[in-house]
Image (cartoon, rainbow, N blue to C red):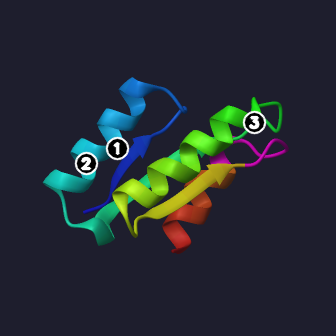
Amino acid sequence: MRVIATVSGGKSSAWTAWWAVNHFPKEDVILYFNDTKWEHEDTYRFLRDLEVFLGTVSYTHLRAHETSLHLVCRLLLE
């Protein structure tokens, strides 16, 4: 079973990511960030810090030119 947790760069989504990683096998957790390419640089710093804190977890993001269908297809192919 895959568990997808959205991460926005805020404290609530960081807690959700932490909770998912601590309640499910790490290999089943995917952290998803919708990157608009207009994010504040501190958001990217926070996400890097979160990645270090949580350890090895699968990360993916929706690129600015993609739709949610692209993401679903990519996740199904993994």
In the rendered structure, which disc, 3 or 1, sits on the residue that comes first in sequence?
1
Q: Residue at x 38, y 49 (%)?
A: 4
Q: Is residue 70 left or right of residue 21?
A: right
Q: Nearer the viewer, mark 2 or mark 3?
A: 3
Q: Quadrant of the N terminus?
A: bottom left
In the image, what residue type sits under mark 2? Ala
Q: Are marks 2 and 3 in contact (CB under 8 Å)?
A: no
Q: Residue at x 25, y 48 (%)?
A: 20
At which x and y percent is residue 47? 56, 45
Residue 17 has which mark? 1
Residue 20's disc number: 2
- On the image, numbered disc 3 is attached to which residue? 41
**Mark-to-mark CA distance, 2 and 3:** 25 Å
Residue type, numbered disc 3: Glu
Residue 6, given in percent of the width and then of the height, sits at 46, 39
Disc 1 marks a residue whose amino acid type is Ala
Residue 50, image x, y percentages: 46, 48
Q: Report the predominant secondary structure element of the magenta stretch.
A: loop
Where are the magenta residues, as a range?
Answer: 63-69
